[in-house]
Image (cartoon, rainbow, N blue to C red):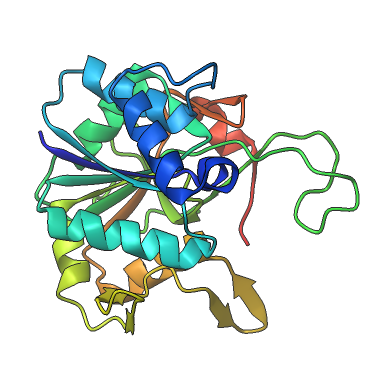
């Protein structure tokens, strides 16, 4: 299986400059030691995929974009145009066990249009955070559907559960879904290089609620076609900013819905 792997490493660009930062990340992907710098978790994810023997992995590294929504749109556009059967988006501070990555690829290996999120634990926040309540409860960046939202006839298919929305720390989208996005009438924006790209990650403001770029993607995905399945992987383990999450606990944890 050929994989188009995209990662956003803004921190490297901020410290070393976009050009040098990108070179450093690519060197790490190629298993080169770069001074005493720690290897970003997303690079560890690439190495995990390599260990599975998946075949060719093309890597898109963005170290310069400060606008997250546009950065994700550019990464998606690259994935669509790559022609790869699978596009994986992974933030620089997210990784997962090899078994989890194997399960993600297996879930995407289908002609059915499908996007699959690997849930991640959210960072803890102060008590006065408007997002987290500071109670110490582990929270997860997922909004599981209370009912089966896909016509499979079962509440759970393998290691997957249907979702409404999710964060974008680690997400895979297969070619069937990418082609629907490519051929859709979703709005395009003219980027700085003159290329028109989809606005799948443009923030949505609706009914008085402000949905971030990650959740907005899933909302647009639903609006594009009911045939695109939206799932969360619920077996394995992810790590976000050093915080591990057992995916089989996702159902019982507090889910972030906005």
Left or right of 194? Residue 147 is: right
- Furthest toward the right, the residue is 128
| Between 96 and 164, the one nearer to me in the picture | 96
Left or right of 161? Residue 85 is: left
* Residue 255, x across and y down, in percent: 62, 47
Residue shown at the point (36%, 59%) measured from the top left: 149
| Between 233 and 39, the one nearer to me in the picture | 39
Position above or below: 47 against 150: above
Q: Quadrant of residue 211?
A: bottom right
| Between 247 and 68, the one nearer to me in the picture | 68
User: Residue 218: in sight, yes or no?
Assistant: no
Quadrant location, the N terminus: top left
* Residue 174, x across and y down, in percent: 19, 49
Quadrant location, the C terminus: bottom right
Left or right of 54? Residue 203 is: right
* Residue 116, x across and y down, in percent: 33, 46
* Residue 48, x across and y down, in percent: 32, 20
Position above or below: 146 against 205: above
Q: Quadrant of residue 45?
A: top left
Residue shown at the point (27%, 79%) measured from the top left: 194
User: Residue 52: in sight, yes or no?
Assistant: yes
Residue shown at the point (49%, 39%) measured from the top left: 119
């Amino acid at each position: 299986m050929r994989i188009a792997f995209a990662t956003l490493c803004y921190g490297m660009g901020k410290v070393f400059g976009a050009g040098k930062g990108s070179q450093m990340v690519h060197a790490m992907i190629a298993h080169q030691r770069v001074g005493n710098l720690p290897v970003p978790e997303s690079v560890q994810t690439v190495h995990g995929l390599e260990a599975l023997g998946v075949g060719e992995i093309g890597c898109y590294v963005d170290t310069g974009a400060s606008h997250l929504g546009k950065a994700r749109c550019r990464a998606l556009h690259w994935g669509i145009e790559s022609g790869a059967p699978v596009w994986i988006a992974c933030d620089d501070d997210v990784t997962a066990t090899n078994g989890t990555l194997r399960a993600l690829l297996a879930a995407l290996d289908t002609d059915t249009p499908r996007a699959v999120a690997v849930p991640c634990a959210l960072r803890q926040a102060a008590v006065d955070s408007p997002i987290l309540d500071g109670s110490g409860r582990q929270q997860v960046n997922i909004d599981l559907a209370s009912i089966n939202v896909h016509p499979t006839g079962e509440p759970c298919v393998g290691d997957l559960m249907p979702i409404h929305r999710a964060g974008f720390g680690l997400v895979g989208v297969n070619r069937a879904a990418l082609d629907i996005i490519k051929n859709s009438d979703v709005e395009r924006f003219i980027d700085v290089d003159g290329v028109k790209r989809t606005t799948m990650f443009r923030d949505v403001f609706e009914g008085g609620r402000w949905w971030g770029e990650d959740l907005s993607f899933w909302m647009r995905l639903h609006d594009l076609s009911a045939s695109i399945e939206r799932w969360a992987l619920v077996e394995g383990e992810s790590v976000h900013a050093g915080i591990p999450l057992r995916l089989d606990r996702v159902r019982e944890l507090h889910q972030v819905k906005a």
